[in-house]
Image (cartoon, rainbow, N blue to C red):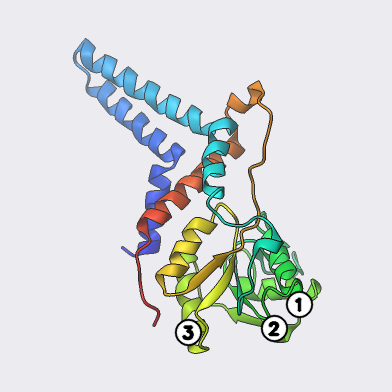
């Protein structure tokens, strides 16, 4: 089994919904074969734990605390604090290509801040080149890198200052393919742009292939919010946010040093 497939499978299993379903199945199995009051009680305890676990990570309060902890490790939040580097590497994941006739232009996703932030860094003189990393995805025609370039042209970045990496399909291959391109050009230091929640894992992946990384995170999700009772009420958006945070945590554990080819 390949590492990307294993990572996706493990991410699904350890997500709050995945672990809750597993616990629920265990409770059902114990209940079906229960022949004593003790086993029936055990079945009820496991079922209760399953519901409690799912409820906890479905609340905005718990989900935001977890995501906020990860984002606090992402790097500088202000443009002025990002040093100059030879190139800014921008990771895909925030845009899909066009697909005529239903969609004639790229579709900006929730992580499109990455491109906007990259354009700001370029215009602020933080780098003279942008490397756009993202391969072909099912949600549009062409590569993410091509779609990002099209958007960045509209943001005033000239085509001559953008390099494209169009064969990667996950964060690990983003890092590997990018390192191959940059090492061939004699470049070993980058400014990395991705979402704050994704940055700790992405940073580690790029360092694992021998690049010196200056993080420039964007797309911060968590802000200070006053407490109210709705923050302990289960919410589907909070559950999705927790699942993404668990995925990043798992990815950090699975990242190991490698060398570029």
Q: CA distance from mark 3 to mark 1?
A: 23 Å
Task: Give residue 183's mark.
Answer: 3
In the image, what residue occupies the spot 35% across and 36% down? 22
Q: Residue 208 appears at what percent x and percent y?
A: 40, 69
Instruction: Tell me if I can see residue 54 in this picture.
Output: yes
Disc 2 designates what residue? 161
Q: Are marks 2 and 3 in contact (CB under 8 Å)?
A: no
User: For the C terminus, which image quadrant?
Assistant: bottom left
**Mark closer to the chain start, 3 or 1:** 1
Q: Along the horizontal axis of the image, is 62 left or right of 16?
A: right
Label 1 crowding class (10 Å Cα cut-off): few <14, some 14-19, many 20+? many
Comparing 26 with 259, the one in front is: 259
Whole-percent x and y of residue 172? 44, 67
Question: Which quarter of the picture shows residue 115?
Answer: bottom right
C-alpha distance separating marks 2 and 3:
18 Å
Q: What element does badge 3 sit on?
A: helix
Q: Nearer the viewer, residue 70 or 134?
A: 70
> SS at mark 2?
helix
Residue with the mark numbered 1: 157
**Could you tell me which secondary element the residue under label 1 belongs to?**
loop
Question: Is residue 151 placed above or below 223 in the rendered structure?
Answer: below
């Amino acid at each position: 089994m390949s590492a990307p497939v294993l990572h996706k499978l493990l991410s699904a299993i350890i997500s709050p919904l995945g672990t809750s379903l597993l616990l629920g199945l265990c409770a059902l199995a114990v209940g079906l074969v229960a022949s004593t009051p003790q086993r029936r009680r055990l079945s009820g305890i496991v079922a209760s734990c399953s519901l409690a676990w799912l409820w906890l990570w479905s609340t905005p309060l718990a989900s935001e605390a977890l995501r906020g902890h990860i984002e606090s490790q992402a790097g500088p939040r202000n443009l002025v604090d990002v040093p100059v580097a030879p190139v800014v590497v921008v990771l895909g994941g925030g845009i899909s290509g066009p697909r005529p006739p239903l969609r004639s232009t790229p579709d900006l996703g929730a992580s499109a801040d990455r491109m906007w932030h990259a354009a700001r860094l370029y215009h602020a003189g933080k780098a003279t080149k942008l490397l756009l990393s993202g391969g072909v995805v099912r949600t549009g025609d062409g590569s993410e890198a091509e779609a990002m370039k099209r958007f960045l042209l509209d943001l005033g970045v000239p085509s001559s200052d953008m390099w494209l990496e169009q064969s990667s399909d996950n964060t690990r291959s983003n890092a590997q393919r990018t390192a191959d391109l940059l090492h061939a050009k004699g470049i070993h230091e980058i400014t990395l742009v991705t979402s704050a929640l994704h940055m700790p894992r992405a940073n580690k992946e790029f360092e694992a292939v021998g690049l010196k990384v200056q993080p420039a995170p964007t797309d911060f999700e968590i802000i200070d919010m006053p407490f109210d009772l709705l923050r302990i009420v289960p919410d589907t958006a909070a559950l999705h946010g927790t699942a993404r945070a668990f995925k990043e945590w798992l990815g950090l554990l699975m990242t190991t040093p490698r060398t570029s080819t």
